[in-house]
Image (tube, rainbow, N blue to C red):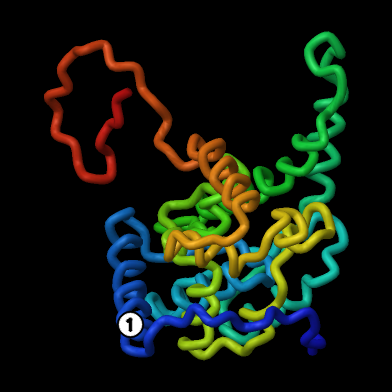
Amino acid sequence: MTEVTGLRTPNTMKLEQNNLEKITDNLMDWIKTSLKSSGGNKAIIGISGGKDSSVVAALCVKALGKENVIGILMPNGIQDDISYAKEIVSFLEIKSTEVNIRDITNNFEYSLNKIKRDIIPEISNQTRLNLPPRIRMALLYAISQSIDDSRVINTSNLSEDWIGYSTVYGDTAGAFSPLGLLTSDEVIQIGKHIGLPDKFVMKKPSDGLTGKTDEDVFGFSYDILNKYIREGKIEDLEIKEKIDKMHKNSRFKYLPIPLFSPDLPIEAEQNDMGTFHLS
């Protein structure tokens, strides 16, 4: 069993119990409705072993039944905390498989290195960091398209999305996002409420890319960020400026792709999920 180390210290921003119960119940109903609206009946979830994928998987199990949830583990070479991912799929009793993406990543970088140097002088560090999340999402969709009526479920939370801590066409993708408007602390509370052990929801989050914790990368804590998001309160003005800048500069990651409007009519019937967003 995994040794429970590096747990987060609980913060004081707690949801009232009746509100927590209401949000959780509504969320499970929303998952059912969203999956049905998308034309699917099975959930494909990338399992990292962190709180977000663990809570999404657990919510889907409760909402859809464990027989309709499949977990995909995708380490990039050696993943030190892969045991958490293996334990959560075992705890939830869902089908799962592990696909190590190291060879795919290496082959991708090999192909990039063959591009002429007048086009790419060298592979940037950001390219290397964002490549694994994009490969994982491509793999999830490849698996989903080979399983009838299955949909890839996004596992991002509001805190990360608020400051753009995600990869375009990587962990920003999915049929729908159960946690997209819930802060990291609220995700923890929901995870505990639905019965997940602390080791799956309280482990300090890390990006799995740089070897640093999320808060080390940010330069500020989730507690500060979450309080600012929910209450608009923040004491350190330098941190406020940094958060505001990160938020502003990352909005393009979460908006529908802009479409040029030629001012020509579209008379065909459109459903709610297929409405065109014209710029």
Query: In what quadrant of the picture does the C terminus appear?
Result: top left
**Residue type (three-letter) at the residue carrying disc 1:** Asn
Q: Is residue 188 visible from the viewing direction of this image? A: yes
Q: Residue at x 50, y 61 (%)?
A: 228
Q: Is residue 142 visible from the viewing direction of this image? A: no
Q: Residue at x 47, y 88 (%)?
A: 193
Left or right: where 110 falls relative to 193: right
Identify the image quadrant of residue 176: bottom left
Left or right: where 79 falls relative to 56: right
Look at the picture and state if 8 lies above or below 144. Answer: below
Which residue occupies the foreground of this view, 63 or 128? 128
Q: Residue at x 65, y 80 (%)?
A: 202
Q: Disc 1 marks which residue?
A: 19
Q: Percent position (x, y) of residue 175?
A: 42, 52
Q: Residue at x 43, y 64 (%)?
A: 230
Left or right: where 244 falls relative to 42: right
Which residue occupies the foreground of this view, 27 or 23? 23
Which residue occupies the foreground of this view, 195 or 189? 189
Q: Does dot 1 land on a helix, a strand or a loop? A: helix
Q: Percent position (x, y) of residue 1?
A: 79, 89
How dense is the environment of label 1, judged by Cα within 10 Å: few (below 14), some, or many (20 and up)? few
Identify the image quadrant of residue 275: top left
How many numbered marks does the figure carry? 1
Identify the image quadrant of residue 38: bottom left
Q: Percent position (x, y) of residue 52?
A: 57, 68
